[in-house]
Amino acid sequence: MLGILFYCLQLHPTATCRYKGIEIKSKYVYNVNVYTINDTLHLFLNGNQKSDHLFWILPDHSYASGSSIIKSFHHIGIQDIQVLTGNCHFHQRITIQPAIVTTKDTISIYPSITGPSTATVGIEATFSSNQPTITGFAWQLTGREDSIHHTPTVTYTFRTPGEKILTLIINRDTARMAVKHIHVFPPPIPISPPIPAIPLPPTHPPVKKAEPSMPVITEEEFKFMLQQVISGYKQCTDFSEYLCNNLLIPVIINEKTMIPFNQFCLQITGRKRLSLDQVKMTRDKSGCITTLSVHYNKKRFIGLF
């Protein structure tokens, strides 16, 4: 069970989302959002002030705080970084790949893929690289592991929309790999001439089936349920439907400490003298509660968290 405490942090609930997003600085930049193992990455928010305090949620299920942080990744693959500040929530996805090994016969320090970043379903898109034609090429699209091309250039005709990831490995050396993200748009809808309307006999409209929706709970109702946890009448699993079964959402206590929700419930159980002053919730687009902010009387219950 993860639980990392943050001390001496001061949140600003009235802050507006004036930031443009997560920015990453590195000594080596190969492709957009592509870095190598053990690179030292400087993470911060574009437009952030040094006085702002941020909560960072990192891919290895750890937390960090501060206006900016330094991070190195030790495993290859896709990594997701999140940061919270006030009412703002930002997300950034990056790719970590093996470290570069430079040899004497290396013509280019690192290969790069040249080609469009967007494409349309049904229309050809051609990609090349900065390597000479005598080089050994291995082009591959994620999701099509059975299809590898060994030509200096490659042409794809995408059949489905969405994000595609194209990789290029030079001379079978995974340390010399380039990655390109391609967003494929659906084909344009052809405009056909209008068809004269033919009157139809009246029909009864079909009965629409009610779609299941997320259960709605107010902050006061959630606070009342937490008081029942204190009294021992409820436990953390009773909140699963409101948290979309994620009992590890962060709970920010008195704007200074953050712990997972299941640990928070465990620590308040049986503390019958504990009185919660205020409970605030942050939800995502689907209605799931993603963050809790709890206030209690820190003079009477100092040392509880």
Image: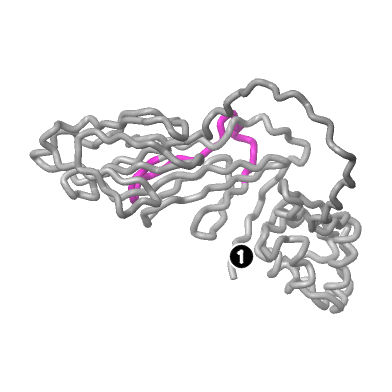
Question: Where does residue 52 sit, x and y in percent of width and height?
Answer: 64, 37
Q: Main secondary structure of the magenta part?
A: loop
- Residue 86, quarter of the rendered image: top right
Choose between 136 and 223: the one closer to the eye.
136
Quadrant placement of the N terminus:
bottom right
Q: Is residue 303 visible?
A: no
Vertical placement of 102 versus 217: above or below?
above
Q: Is residue 290 left or right of residue 279?
A: left
Choose between 142 and 74: the one closer to the eye.
142
Choose between 150 and 1: the one closer to the eye.
150
Question: Where does residue 7 sit, x and y in percent of width and height?
Answer: 65, 54
| Label 1 CA crowd tier, 10 Å (few <14, some 14–19, many 20+) | some
Q: Is residue 231 left or right of residue 212?
A: right
Q: Determine the residue positioned at 13% across, 38% down.
A: 135
Asked whether 64 falls inside the magenta stretch, the response is no
Question: Where does residue 258 sit, x and y in percent of width and height?
Answer: 67, 57
Q: Count every numbered label the image shows and give the total.
A: 1
Question: Where does residue 190 sit, x and y in percent of width and height?
Answer: 57, 26
In the image, the segment drawn in magenta is 34-54
- Residue 18, quarter of the rendered image: top right
- Residue 238, quarter of the rendered image: bottom right
Tell me which amino acid carries mark 1. Answer: Gly
Q: Is residue 288 visible?
A: yes
Quadrant placement of the C terminus:
bottom right
Choose between 114 and 30: the one closer to the eye.
114
Residue holding disc 1: 3
Is label 1 in a helix, a strand or a loop? loop
Q: Determine the residue positioned at 29% across, 50% down.
A: 147
Q: Determine the residue positioned at 76% across, 51% down.
A: 287
